[in-house]
Every structure is written in C-alpha cells, then in structure tokens.
Image: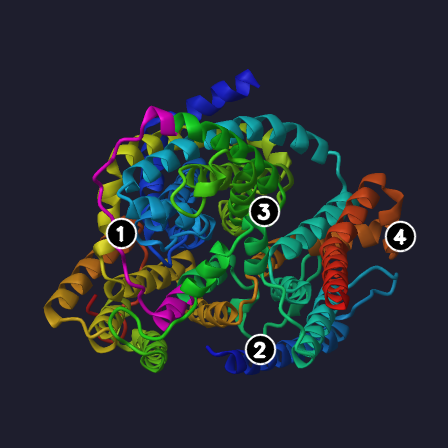
C-alpha cells in the first residue's frame, strides 16, 4: 500500500500532471456552476481535447472536472437557487435561505470545507477498498463477470428513478445500440445498413456528447431562463461555532455518501438527498432545516463529494461504472486503449495510483480555490445563456468531429442530441441507457464465453457460488423496491379505510 | 409540456421503441441466434435486447393506458426529506409561464425548432462553406436571430469562440477541419 501511494505521488506530482489537474478542477468548477452543464457533459465534451495527452494525464484532468463540478454546482445552488449539478439540488433548500440572510459566504465556505473533508475520508476508504476488491475480481471468470454485469445493470435501473419498466427498457435499448457494428467474437456486421462508418459500432463519445451536451442545450432552450436572485457577500467568514456544529453533519454525510456511492447507479444525487433527510431527523438544529440551517448545507455537500469518490470503487475495481460521469470516464479508458477493471491494478499501477493520489491533490487545490475565490467564480453567471449555448454547441460538435475526423460523428451527435432532449422531456432515465451502451460489448463477450463454457447452456451460471449470490442479489434489488412499494400502498390504503370506518 | 401532450409523446415513444425492438428480434434471428453446436450466435444479443425493449415498451404503454400513477424520484426525495420542501422544489423547477425575458412557452418552442433548424443547416453547409465558417454562422444565428442579442457583442463572441476553436483544434491538436468547396479556413 505504501509503495503504491509513493508511486501515486511520484506520478501525480509531475509538473505536467499537476498542471492538467489544476486545469481540470478549474474547468470542473466553471462547468459545475453553469446551469445546464454538468460534470457528465463537461467530461464528454472535453474527452477529445485530451486525446494527445498521456492516458494518466488525461484521466487526471477528466477526473478533476468530475469532482471540480461537485464544488462548482454548489455555488449556483446557494446564490441563485439553481443547481448546476443534480447532486446539488438539495443544497438549494438551506444554502439559498442562508444566502438570503446574507450568509452566502458561510454556506459556500462550509460546503467547500465539508466537501474537502468528505473527499479525503472517502479517498482513504476508496484506496483501502478498491485494491482488495480488484484482487478478488481477478479470480472471476466469464461466468462471474456476466453475473456482475447483470447486477450492475439491475442496480442502475433500480436507482435511476421513475418506473422499473422504463429503466429496463432504456438499459435494453443501450445493449441494443451496442450491438451495432461487427459482432463481438464473430465477423458478422449488424444493423449497419451498408454504412461503412457503422462497422466499428456507434462511437461512445459521440453518443455521450449528443445525449448530455446537445440534449441539455435543447432542453434549456425550451425551458427558458430562470430569474436569478442576487445574494450579497456581506459575511464571508464562517465562525468557529458554525464549523463545530457542522462537523457531525459532515462526518455523517461522508459516511452515507460513501456507502451509497459504492452502489453502481445510486450516485451522488441520491446520497445528497438521503443524507439531508437523515440529518434533518438526527440534527440538534432540526427546527431550522429549510430555513437556512448550516448543517443542511454541510451534510448533502459532504455526501455528494464522498459519493463521487466512492463511485470509483466499482468503476476501477470491477470495470462497472458507478454513475453517469464514471460511465463516460470508463469510455475514456477504452479510448486511451486501456481495459478498465481489476487487471488495471496489476498491469498499470502507475496509472491507477497516480489517478487516486491526484484526487487528493485536486481536492486540496479546490479547497484553496473555492474558499477565497467563490465570488470570482460566481461572476461567470453573468455570461448570458444566449451566448453560452451556441458556444457549447460549437465545442460539442467540433469535439465530436476531432475524435474521428469525420462529419458522420457530427451527424451522430445531432441525432443523439435530439434523442437526449426527448428523453429529458419524457422524464426517461439516461443512466441505464449509458450503462447499456458501455457494458454492451463486454456483456456480449461474457455471454459468448459463458455459452461456450457451458456448451450452449447458461445453467453453468448456477455452478458458480459467486455468480449465484450475485444473481440472487440482482433479483432482490430488481424486485425489492416494487414489493416494498406494494406493501407501503397496502398499509396506506388499510390505514385510510380504517380512518374512514371510524 | 402539459400532461396530455407528454402522455401522447410518451405513447409515440413507446410505439417507436417497441417497433425498433421487434425489428431487432427479427433481425437477430436473421443474424443467427444459436450456432449449430448450440452456443449463442451473433444474433442472440440483438434478439434478446430487442425483445426486452419491445416487452418493456409494451408494459410502459399499458401502464399509460391504465393511467398508473407514476412513481417519481421527486416523491422519493420528498419522502426522504420528510416535508414539503422537495415538492416546492419540484414546482419551482418545472416550467411555469414566461421566463425572465418575458418569452412564453410557445415562443420558446419556436426557438427550440429554430435552434434545431440552424444546427441541421450548419451541418449541411459544412461541405460548401467549411467547418469554421458554417459554425460561425450558427453562433451568430443563435445569438442574433433566436436570442435577439445585439449584433456587435454577438459578432465579438463569435469571433472569439472561432479563434479559440481554431487555435485549440487546428493549431494545437492538428485536427484537419473541413474547409469546404470555398477552401477559405
């Protein structure tokens, strides 16, 4: 472990990696505070810019955007009650109220401090958990891998929100999209309609840029601009008492965030809502929640940062992305010619540990940047969206073009942009679709290998105890929420009928 | 989008996805679902995934016709937070009338169509005008024609954005952006 940490510091502390880490966290903060631009969009748009960099440098920068956006998202939540990131939605409840009372500075400060503490705690846990998990996963064969991918898909669908049928429909659609092109393990071309550009499959980066960047722009144009409410920075100093009162909330938020963040698909948003809900129940200051309680900012902000780091546990150890942004990052690994998953810990420790240590360095940079410079970042909000979105469109489309030097990529981005927009309008979950597309080729490979091992029979899945446990877990997770809801509905209707008969 | 329009659009979406799913099932059998030795073939995943898409699209469609109340993530959030805060948040985040520029929903719908039209026209113009000129026109079109911004600032933003794009992609990353028939930049 110590050797690996040393290796990580040696890698992350080179001048080049420090520079790109800094660029990543600054861009991430800016991207996070722009309403309509999230970390997923930011990472997707900027992947093409990193193609000339070394893989480790590129991933350090992209990861910097990811956790930088968690900090940036808070600024808009507090100042204009418009979360830049879904994970910062709940911060608007107390953060904005604090801003209205002239305590915007304190809200941003506790958010930066809480985020930093949560990041360091979760980073320690990530470093402790991911390697042994990866070591265990190294013993997995195609059968176990297939079971884990089924579990990953089920978890993402379960936590995506909305109805289970819609989540499953989108996950299956993602798998179907991944089958376009030459079949994995075979030589047949599928769904290419004679188009040579489709032989290599539907490229991942173009799909992501379309779904997240262009889809979001179209959605924002339709939604229209919301009224910004200005907050003053009269009091930028956080008091020692406020910091002391917030510590239990920060620690609880970090724990909740990490546990939920490990689950693929649960992600930062659920973690922030869950920690806020729990904090509201256990806090000594519960009466002030919703009216500007500092714990109401500290808890969800710590949770979403802890979850962001915890998302990397399944991503790095199993090759199953923890959420939307880590799915895009996983796609970036493959673009740089790396096979994400447990083998990376063995074959490329420099990259893995360099990346992990860069999280620590990046979070220190973010704390130093955000404490004094939050008001400066907030000035970015003055750029009217009417100028911003054409620039986002330009960056997205030129970025997509640069991946393959082919206008077909641009056309694909536009098509998936429209699909992303429709999905947003219809409230359809994007995460299952993304995971289906990312896991599709690996899923098919495992299917082919498992079928070959079982000589055509998938009953071989039942011969592996690990696969059986994982599949049972998948069934429980798939059916659990529906059963719980049914029980809750019965109880509620029972209580109502009892009240009526009284 | 009001509730009935969203419902109609949802039904159309399910129908389209269902049709795609069924097409994938048929194609999957064409690609060979099982090989002669009983192992899965190249058509297996398309057939299974297509079948699942069609099945879940049908279930979603049935749910819509039965008007099953949607289980919504906001409801979960409200339950977690334990008060009306999340519900208020939902009301605030949903579309409500005019935006800060006084544009109605109808106007914004027209803007959306205009932006889409401009994007498609831009892509179509690239072979003729080249990448940068076409996208420069897109920037100007969106800012001036759609957003009703003033000419001069729009022009400045366009020139700055195009210069940055040129420096980053053409000079730094050496991406050969199409110059079109005009061959200017």
Furthest toward the front, the residue is A502
* Residue corresponding to mark 1: B168
User: Please, what secondary structure does the residue beneath circle 4 have?
Assistant: helix
Q: Nearer the viewer, mark 3 or mark 1?
A: 3
* Residue corresponding to mark 2: B10
Rendered-image quadrant of the N terminus of chain A: top right
* Residue corresponding to mark 4: A459
* Residue A84, position as x, y percentages in the image: 38, 53
Please report, as a chain letter, where disc 3 is located. A
The CA distance from mark 1 to mark 4 is 54 Å
Q: Residue at x 44, y 32 (%)?
A: A359
> Upstream in the sequence, badge 1 or badge 2?
2
Task: Reply above or below: A88 against A160.
Answer: above
The CA distance from mark 3 to mark 4 is 27 Å
Mark 4 crowdedness (10 Å alpha carbons): few <14, some 14-19, many ≥20: few
The CA distance from mark 1 to mark 2 is 41 Å
* Quadrant of res B53: bottom right
Please report, as a chain letter, where disc 2 is located. B
The CA distance from mark 4 to mark 2 is 38 Å
Please report, as a chain letter, where disc 4 is located. A
* Residue corresponding to mark 3: A321
* Quadrant of res A315: top right
Q: Is A171 situated left or right of A332 in this image?
A: right
């Amino acid at each position: 472990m110590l050797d690996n940490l040393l290796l990580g510091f040696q890698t992350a502390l080179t001048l080049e990696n420090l520079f790109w880490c800094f660029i990543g966290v600054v861009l991430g903060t800016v991207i996070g505070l722009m309403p309509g631009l999230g970390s997923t969009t930011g990472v997707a748009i900027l992947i093409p810019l990193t193609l000339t960099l070394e893989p480790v440098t590129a991933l350090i920068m992209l990861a910097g955007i990811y956790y930088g956006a968690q900090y940036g998202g808070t600024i808009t939540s507090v100042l204009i009650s418009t979360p830049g990131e879904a994970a910062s939605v709940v911060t608007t409840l107390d953060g904005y109220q604090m801003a209205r009372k002239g305590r915007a500075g304190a809200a941003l400060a506790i958010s930066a401090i809480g985020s930093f503490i949560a990041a360091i705690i979760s980073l320690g846990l990530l470093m402790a958990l991911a390697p042994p998990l990866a070591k265990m996963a190294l013993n997995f064969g195609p059968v176990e891998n297939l079971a884990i991918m089924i579990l990953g898909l089920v978890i993402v669908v379960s936590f995506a929100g909305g109805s289970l049928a819609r989540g499953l429909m989108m996950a299956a659609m993602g798998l179907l999209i991944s089958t376009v092109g030459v079949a994995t393990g075979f030589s047949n071309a599928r769904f290419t309609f004679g188009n040579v550009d489709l032989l290599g499959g539907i490229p991942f980066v173009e799909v992501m840029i379309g779904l997240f960047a262009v889809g979001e722009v179209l959605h924002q144009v339709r939604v229209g601009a919301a009224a910004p409410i200005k907050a003053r920075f009269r009091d930028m100093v956080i008091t020692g008492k406020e910091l002391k009162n917030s510590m239990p909330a920060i620690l609880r938020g970090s724990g909740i965030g990490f546990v939920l963040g490990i689950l693929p698909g649960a992600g930062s948003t659920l973690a922030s809502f869950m920690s806020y809900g729990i904090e509201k129940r256990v806090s000594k200051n519960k009466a002030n929640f919703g009216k500007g309680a500092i714990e109401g900012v500290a808890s969800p902000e710590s949770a979403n940062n802890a979850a962001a780091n915890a998302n990397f546990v399944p991503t790095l150890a199993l090759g199953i992305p923890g959420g939307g942004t880590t799915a895009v990052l996983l796609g970036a690994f493959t673009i740089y010619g790396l096979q994400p998953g447990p083998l990376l810990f063995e074959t490329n420790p420099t990259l893995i540990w360099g990346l992990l240590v860069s999280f620590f360095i990046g979070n220190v940079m973010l704390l130093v940047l955000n404490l004094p410079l939050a008001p400066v970042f907030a000035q970015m909000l003055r750029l009217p969206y009417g100028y911003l979105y054409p620039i986002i469109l330009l960056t997205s489309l030129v970025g997509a073009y640069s991946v393959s030097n082919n206008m077909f990529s641009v056309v694909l981005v536009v098509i998936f942009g429209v699909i992303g927009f429709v999905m947003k309008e219809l409230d359809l979950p994007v995460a299952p679709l993304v995971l289906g597309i990312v896991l599709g080729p690996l899923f098919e490979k495992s299917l082919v290998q498992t079928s070959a091992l079982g000589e055509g029979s998938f009953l071989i899945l039942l011969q592996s105890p690990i696969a059986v446990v994982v599949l049972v877990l998948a069934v429980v997770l798939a059916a659990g929420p529906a059963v719980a809801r049914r029980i809750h509905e019965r109880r509620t209707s029972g209580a109502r009928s009892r009240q009526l008969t009284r | 989008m009001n509730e009935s329009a969203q419902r109609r659009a949802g039904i159309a979406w399910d129908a389209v996805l269902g049709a795609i799913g069924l097409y994938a099932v048929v194609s999957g059998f064409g690609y060979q679902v099982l090989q002669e030795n009983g192992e899965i073939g190249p058509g297996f995943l398309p057939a299974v995934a297509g079948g699942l898409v069609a099945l879940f699209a049908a279930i979603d469609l049935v749910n819509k016709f039965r008007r099953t109340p949607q289980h919504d993530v906001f409801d979960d959030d409200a339950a977690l937070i334990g008060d009306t805060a999340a519900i208020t948040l939902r009301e605030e985040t949903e579309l409500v009338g005019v935006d800060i520029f006084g544009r109605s929903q109808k106007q914004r719908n027209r803007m959306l169509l205009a932006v889409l039209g401009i994007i498609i026209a831009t892509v179509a113009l690239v072979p003729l005008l080249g990448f940068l000129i076409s996208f420069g026109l897109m920037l100007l079109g969106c800012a001036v024609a759609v957003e009703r911004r003033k000419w001069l600032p729009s022009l400045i933003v366009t020139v700055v954005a195009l210069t940055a794009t040129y420096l980053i992609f053409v000079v730094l990353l050496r991406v050969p952006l199409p110059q079109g028939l005009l061959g200017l930049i």
